[in-house]
Image (cartoon, rainbow, N blue to C red):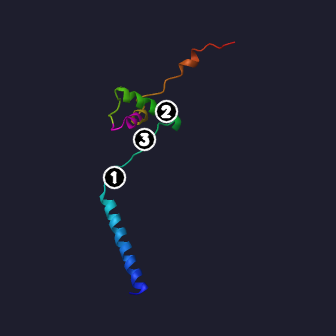
């Protein structure tokens, strides 16, 4: 068998395996991952911190204000994105007395 024939057979095997892989991957239905858009005027850090705090509350048993998702973190993100929860003002600074 010549080198050209071996090369053609190897190339044909690679093409067939690639097509089989592409067909297999197209048959698999993977869940779509969607991003939750944070509200305008809120930094990414603030969004992450508030979602984390709200997810901890939901994990402890608080009632969700939107239809619950499979994960509490996603539910917290949806609550914050729909402005069902908001950040409360810092009360520690307003009640503090300056020290001389």
Q: Where residue 60 appears, x then y in whole percent?
A: 37, 26
The span from disc 3 to disc 1 (Cα, nearest Å) is 19 Å
Is residue 74 one of those drawn in magenta?
yes
Q: Where is residue 77, by image quadrant?
A: top left
Question: Which contiguous range is marked in magenta?
Answer: 69-76
Q: Where residue 66 appears, x then y in whole percent?
A: 34, 32
Residue that numbered label 3 is attached to: 36
Q: Residue at x 40, y 36 (%)?
A: 73
Q: Quadrant of the N terminus?
A: bottom left
Please identify the dominant SS of the magenta region.
helix
User: Left or right of 41: which side holds 30?
Assistant: left
Mark 3 and mark 2 lie on one chain; the one further toward the N terminus is 3
Residue 77 in view: yes
Tag 2's secondary structure?
helix
Q: Where residue 31 appears, x then y in whole percent?
A: 34, 49
Q: Eyeballing the image, is 30 above or below 24?
A: above
């Amino acid at each position: 068998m010549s080198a050209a024939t071996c090369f053609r057979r190897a190339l044909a095997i690679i093409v067939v395996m690639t097509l089989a892989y592409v067909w297999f991957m197209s048959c698999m239905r993977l869940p779509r991952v969607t991003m939750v858009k944070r509200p305008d005027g809120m930094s990414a850090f603030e969004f992450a911190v508030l979602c984390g705090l709200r997810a901890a509350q939901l994990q402890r048993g608080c009632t969700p204000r939107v239809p619950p998702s499979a994960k509490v973190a996603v539910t917290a993100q949806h609550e914050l994105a729909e402005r069902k929860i908001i950040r409360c003002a810092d009360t520690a600074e307003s009640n503090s007395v300056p020290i001389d």
